[in-house]
Image (spheres, rainbow, N blue to C red):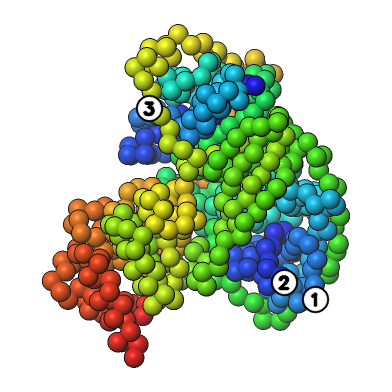
């Protein structure tokens, strides 16, 4: 069977959920082979085997340490050129997009970004994209070179294989890029962990917008998210007003989310925002303005003041859960 | 120091976007504008000149004849000149082909720093900055929230999900800037008048030494198979809060197994 190369992201050997999704997707197209950056310890290799990876390419980071997206792109392109997979799958997002774009140029291959679905076709993988602010679906394929496809989180439910495989581990050395061609990260300030689920992966997202009114008001959004075990999101208005960190922004210039439940408080629902959330399964909106466009996509809408509705809802949830 | 800014003419966000018969975005039947996300790139270039860190700004665009509207808007904001790559053979060009053309044009224009927006507001792929860096052998910082030039290098601030980073690249370099980099200015009346006199050079594929077969629909490395509108969501229930909204909302969540 043909190989499908998957760039796997992990935290100290624990595979990130979007990478597990890519491995599941890859099995529908062929035999998954994982590319991991850094040491592939036994727990990681075992976990990859449980998700069907028959080969693990462990990329040794070049010395001195190189700019990571460039090194990852070099590795992916080198392995793809050597093994001729039927596709390279990479998770969508700023980091993945840079790796994919560079790999496509090196391979002189077509690239499809932000796929929401990938299926096997008679002439290679067929990817579905959600375009024009999420208002159209486009099916496309790559017709030159190894298809490089970035896939949005939540495209599939990750599933382990019935019978785990023992992957063959191959160590891959990557030539260090020319110093002039790479930037240097000279400082990095880590962000505080929130303990909440990752926004793009969460089953429940509670998001706040301008209607929240203040940073203090935004705490209501966080309380509801915690009551539902969900992630916190925001419209651009709320992040611009610094009521919450920028990385919580959902929409055209922020994240795209597709949770089971999206609950929008005080978000009017401009097209730029809807682009990032209208793939959600169930949408609930609370807004004072009955004409807010968010109600056009809501399964359940409440015209009212979120400052009274949300506290009451939090109480109601506590009561029903006993 | 010379800055090249990449700009794109895109359909208005509020217009109704359609696919043409060849499954490419219909750019003729829709009002267009300078991509809002490119305005941030223009703004950063203008600020570098105002700060004395750069001396010259040239814009580069590729697109249909009407793309010159986007060029004039950028020139009205400021800057010196522009190049418009215009060729009928470019219709249907994909990201690989676009990066091939823009890399060749940048090479011919000359630059010390290339600034682009974080994405176009139409295709939204966000791949051009990295593709151009790869083709031109340039260090690239994508998604910078702030940038400054000092000691023949560009220093950028960037947010990832896990950290805020300071990333430095030696010039010549390429930077893409986000919508957090600073609000773009409106063109002044004086700027709009001045823009009419600024030179806009048109280059064809032949001027760039690129064979037509490598671009356009025929030269694309990707192919669109089908296009279909997202099925409209079924109309939902909208209630007005009369003191019972929280309970009714909780009922809805419970009925949908979301509690």
Residue A59's x, y, as percent?
80, 59
In the picture, measured across the screen, residue B229 lies left or right of residue A201, that is: left
* Disc 2 target residue: A13
Residue at the extreme top: B197
Q: Residues within 10 Å of mark 3 (few under 14, many from 20)?
A: some
**The residue tagged with tag 3: helix, strand or loop?**
loop
Kindly identify the residue that appears in the image at 37 percent across and 27 percent down. Answer: B186
Judged by depth in the image, the label closer to the viewer, 1 or 3, is 3
Using the numbered discs, state the Cα–Cα distance from disc 1 to disc 3 in whole angstroms.
58 Å
Q: Residues within 10 Å of mark 2 (few under 14, many from 20)?
A: some
Residue B98's x, y, as percent?
60, 32
Chain designation of label 3:
B
* Disc 1 target residue: A42
Using the image, determine if residue A321 lies above or below residue A58.
Answer: below
Using the image, determine if residue A318 lies above or below residue A31.
Answer: below
Residue B66's x, y, as percent?
43, 21
* Disc 3 target residue: B186
- Please state, as top left, top right, bottom left or bottom right, where the N terminus of chain A lies in the image: bottom right
**The residue tagged with tag 2: helix, strand or loop?**
loop
**The residue tagged with tag 1: helix, strand or loop?**
helix
Residue at the extreme bottom: A322
């Amino acid at each position: 069977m043909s190989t499908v190369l998957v760039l796997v992201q992990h935290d100290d050997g624990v595979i990130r959920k979007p990478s597990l999704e890519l491995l599941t997707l890859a099995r529908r197209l062929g035999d998954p082979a994982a590319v991991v950056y850094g040491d592939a310890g036994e727990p990681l290799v075992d976990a990859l085997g449980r998700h069907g990876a028959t080969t693990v390419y462990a990329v040794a980071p070049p010395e001195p340490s190189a700019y990571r997206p460039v090194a990852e792109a070099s590795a992916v392109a080198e392995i793809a050129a050597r093994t001729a997979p039927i596709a390279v799958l990479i998770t969508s997002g700023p980091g993945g997009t840079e790796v994919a774009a560079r790999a496509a140029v090196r391979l002189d291959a077509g690239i499809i970004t932000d796929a929401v679905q990938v299926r096997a076709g008679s002439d290679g993988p067929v990817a579905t994209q959600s375009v024009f602010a999420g208002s159209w679906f486009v099916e496309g394929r790559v017709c030159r070179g190894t298809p490089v496809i970035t896939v949005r989180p939540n495209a599939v439910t990750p599933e382990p294989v019935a019978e785990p495989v023992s992957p063959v581990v191959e160590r891959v050395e990557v030539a260090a890029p020319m110093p002039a061609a790479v930037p240097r990260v000279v400082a990095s300030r880590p962000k505080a962990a929130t303990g909440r689920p990752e926004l793009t992966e969460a089953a429940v997202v509670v998001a706040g917008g301008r209607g929240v009114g203040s940073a203090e008001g935004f705490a209501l959004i966080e309380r509801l998210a915690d009551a539902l075990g969900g992630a916190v999101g925001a419209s651009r208005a709320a992040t611009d007003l610094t009521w919450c960190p920028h990385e919580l922004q959902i929409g055209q210039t922020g994240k795209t989310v597709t949770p089971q439940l999206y609950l929008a408080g005080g978000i009017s629902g401009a097209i730029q925002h809807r682009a990032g959330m209208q793939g959600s399964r169930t949408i609930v909106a609370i807004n004072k303005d009955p004409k807010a466009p968010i109600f056009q996509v809501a399964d359940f809408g409440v015209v009212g003041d979120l400052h009274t509705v949300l506290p009451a809802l939090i109480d109601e949830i506590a009561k029903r859960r006993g | 120091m010379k800055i090249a800014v990449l700009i794109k003419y895109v359909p208005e966000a509020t217009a109704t976007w359609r696919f043409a018969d060849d499954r490419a975005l219909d750019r003729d039947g829709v009002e267009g504008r300078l991509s809002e996300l490119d305005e941030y790139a223009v703004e950063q270039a203008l600020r570098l000149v105002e700060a004395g860190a750069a001396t010259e700004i040239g814009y580069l665009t590729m697109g249909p004849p009407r793309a010159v509207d986007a060029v004039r808007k950028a020139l009205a904001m400021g800057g010196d000149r522009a190049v418009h790559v215009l060729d009928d053979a470019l219709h249907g060009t994909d990201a690989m082909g676009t990066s091939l053309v823009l890399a060749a044009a940048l090479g011919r224009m000359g630059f010390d720093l290339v600034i682009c927006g974080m994405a176009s507001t139409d295709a939204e792929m966000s791949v051009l900055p990295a593709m151009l860096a790869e083709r031109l052998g340039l260090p690239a910082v994508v998604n910078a929230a702030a940038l400054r030039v000092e000691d023949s290098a560009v220093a950028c601030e960037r947010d990832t999900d896990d950290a805020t980073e300071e990333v430095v690249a030696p010039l010549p370099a390429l930077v893409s800037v986000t919508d957090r980099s600073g609000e773009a200015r409106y063109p002044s009346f004086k700027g709009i008048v001045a823009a009419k006199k600024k030179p806009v050079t048109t280059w064809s594929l032949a001027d760039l030494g690129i064979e037509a077969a490598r671009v356009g629909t025929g030269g694309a490395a990707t192919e669109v198979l089908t296009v279909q509108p997202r099925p409209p969501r079924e109309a939902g229930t909208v209630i007005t809060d009369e003191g019972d909204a929280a309970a009714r909302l909780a009922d809805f969540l419970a009925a949908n197994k979301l509690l």
